[in-house]
Amino acid sequence: MAKTYKNLFEHLTTFEALHRAYGRVVKGRRHQMDVIRFETNLESNLIEIQNSLLWKTYQTGPYRNFKVFEPKERDIAALPIKDRIVQHALARARAGVRSEGRYRQVFSLDLP
């Protein structure tokens, strides 16, 4: 039987959780233009994300497609920064649940 966990949404939508997720997203990427633009109004942007989550109006943005040529040519699809922040906050909120269960490996995000 599946186990139900409560209050994950409340943990995901706190300003502190979104700010921590922002810190993980921009680590090593502070020179990128989308990060610089987002950081100019950091607090209001995080509050906007928080409100859209709380009001259940959040929608993901369009992917940015580009090519990487090292070591070989690959097509990359990247989410906008606000979506990466929500993704990291969600992964962090679920980290406590995963640590209680038998699945502890995460292959898409590195969590401290």
Image (spheres, rainbow, N blue to C red):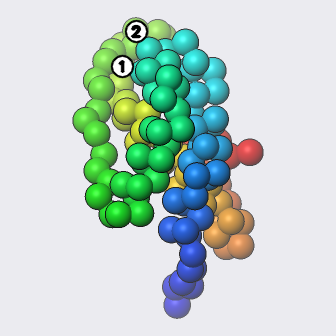
Q: Residue drawn 30% across and 26% down? A: 64
Give the residue type that dot 2 points to.
Phe
Q: Residue drawn 31% across and 18% down? A: 66
Which of the 4 quarters of the picture holds residue 75? top left
Answer above or below: position of 97 versus 30.
below
Question: Count the marks: how many?
Answer: 2
x and y, in percent, of residue 77 in the image: 33, 29
Q: Pointers 2 and 1 in contact (CB under 8 A)?
A: yes
Q: Residue furthest bottom?
A: 1
Q: Residue drawn 33% across and 63% down? A: 56
**Residue identifier under label 2:** 69
Q: Residue drawn 41% across and 42% down? A: 83
Q: Residues within 10 Å of mark 1 (few under 14, many from 20)?
A: few
Pointer 2 or 1: first along the chain: 2
99 with respect to 75 (left or right): right
Give the residue type that dot 1 points to.
Arg
87 with respect to 101 (left or right): left
Q: Nearer the viewer, residue 111 or 41?
A: 41
**Residue identifier under label 1:** 74
Q: Nearer the viewer, residue 24 or 100?
A: 24
Which of the 4 quarters of the picture holds residue 68? top left
x and y, in percent, of residue 39 in the image: 52, 26
Helix, strand or loop for disc 1: strand
Helix, strand or loop for disc 2: loop
Q: Residues within 10 Å of mark 2 (few under 14, many from 20)?
A: few
x and y, in percent, of residue 82 in the image: 42, 39
